[in-house]
Image: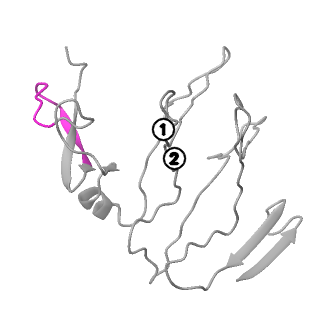
Amino acid sequence: MALTTFSGPVASQNGFITTINDTSTGAATFNASTTEVTMTGAGGVGGRTLFQLNADAALGSFSNALKANVVYGATGRTTGLGSAFVAELTLSAGTTSGTYAPVEIELNAPASASTGTRTSFIYASTQGANVATVDTNGVFFNLQGLTAGAGKMLVAGTTLGTAYGGLRVRVGNANYWVPLYAAEPT
């Protein structure tokens, strides 16, 4: 493993740049860095690493507090699941009360907030020269580990009426379509 650390302005970036090259092979998980927090005080809150971007000016075409980016080269690939960001939550016998979710999304709107032209909880897009392949073969989300049945998260065979269209999703080994309606169903 090679580690290079630069301090100060480097190629239009301010702050610290760390480059780590790992050439190990095999199934061992490589972590470039780890932040581990153990909270043992009852009633404690937080325990997180905070990435905060304060914007006190009209910024350009985008702004992000944290970016996760994986770039596959011409021969690069993942034999299993490849993702740019993973949110993982492990439940225990003690998680009998409370609400648990691997991803929490909050869109805060104080009294002076404006929604802009299009405000949403999730923004998803695809781009590039071969968008048609993603459009033809991709799914909006892939949900694994569920079984269909009454009282389950996935209920099959329910008819709600005539839908405007559907959004293809993958559950287990099958594709389904989430119905979309042009007007609110009554």
**Main SS of the magenta segment?**
loop
Secondary structure at badge 2 equals: loop
Q: Which residue is mark 2?
A: 89
The correct choice, above or below, for 53 with respect to 45 in the image is below
Q: Position of residue 173 (x, y in %)?
A: 21, 57
Left or right: 44 with respect to 129? Answer: right
Left or right: 55 with respect to 101? Answer: right
In the rendered image, the residue lying farthest to the front is: 93
Of the numbered discs in the image, which one, if any, rests on residue 70? none
Residue 2, image quadrant: bottom right
Indicate the quadrant containing the C terminus: top left, top right, bottom left or bottom right. Answer: top left
Task: Determine contact: label 2, label 1, CB under 8 Å.
Answer: yes
Q: Which residue is at the front of the view, 44 or 4?
A: 44
Q: Residues within 10 Å of mark 1 (few under 14, many from 20)?
A: few
Q: Which residue is mark 1?
A: 101
Secondary structure at badge 1 equals: loop
Q: Amino acid at mark 1?
A: Ala
Mark 2 or mark 1, earlier in chain: 2
Q: Which residue is at the front of the view, 145 or 169?
A: 145
Q: Position of residue 40 (x, y in %)?
A: 72, 40
Residue found at x 72% / y 44%: 50
Indicate the quadrant containing the N terminus: top left, top right, bottom left or bottom right. Answer: bottom right
Residue 59, image quadrant: top right
In the rendered image, the residue lying farthest to the right is: 8
Q: Is residue 163 magenta?
A: yes
The correct choice, above or below, for 138 with respect to 38 in the image is below
The correct choice, above or below, for 130 with respect to 170 in the image is below
Q: Position of residue 150 (x, y in %)?
A: 17, 31
Magenta stretch: give its range: 156-169
